[in-house]
Image (tube, helix red, strand yellow):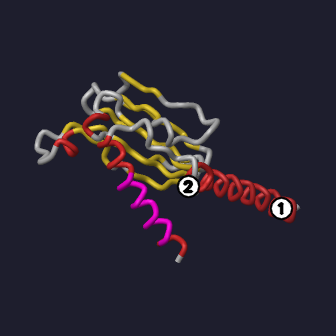
Amino acid sequence: MIFDRIRKYAVRLATIVILSVSGFATAQAGKIYEINQIIDIHAQTPEDFYRFVPNYYWIEPGDTVRFNNTTGNHTVKSVAGIWPEGVQLVDIAGQDVSDIELTKPGVYGFRCRVHARHGMFALIIVGSPDPNLKQVSFDKLNDRGEKVFRKLFEKMEIDRKAHQQ
């Protein structure tokens, strides 16, 4: 009889531990990375006036990017040529907060439709850049956009080398 009680408690304890551990793992998966869409009236250059902050993340598949529209007149749109094939394009406007879960590895380019002419772009690498890196094209970007993305891809290559060491 005492062994039956001990066994019941042991089973309950094991169940609690298993549920706790599995709940913990679920809570840890799928991090949220925030990007603020800002207008910086104190900026020294036009490129810094309208921007995503930060404008670069290297995340894992299943993580979420949260765009916080701090002024109400920014948008979030996929950049043609910097987007994995088969992934639904993004076109968000008029929302204070927008969450985008990215599950497919590759490189993802984002822009503000309104302020792209000023250089408002962001680059997100999901898992590995390799799946669509060779297909990346700057053909549909303005000069400022190409300049911003070239710097972001340079940062990505530095990060990739650091990860490989």
Relative side of 96 to 33, left or right = left
Relative side of 16 to 128, left or right = right
Tally the numbered discs. Answer: 2
Could you tell me the amino acid type at mark 1?
Arg
SS for tag 1?
helix
68 and 47: which one is in front? Answer: 47
Examine the residues drawn in magenta and state their main secondary structure: helix
27 and 21: which one is in front? Answer: 27
Mark 1 Cα-neighbour bin, 10 Å: few <14, some 14–19, many ≥20: few
The residue labelled by disc 1 is: 7
Image position, residue 134 (x, y; %): 57, 52
Image position, residue 83 (x, y; %): 53, 41
Could you tell me the amino acid type at mark 2?
Pro
Mark 2 Cα-neighbour bin, 10 Å: few <14, some 14–19, many ≥20: many
Range shown magenta: 150-161
> In the picture, which quadrant includes the N terminus?
bottom right
The residue labelled by disc 2 is: 129
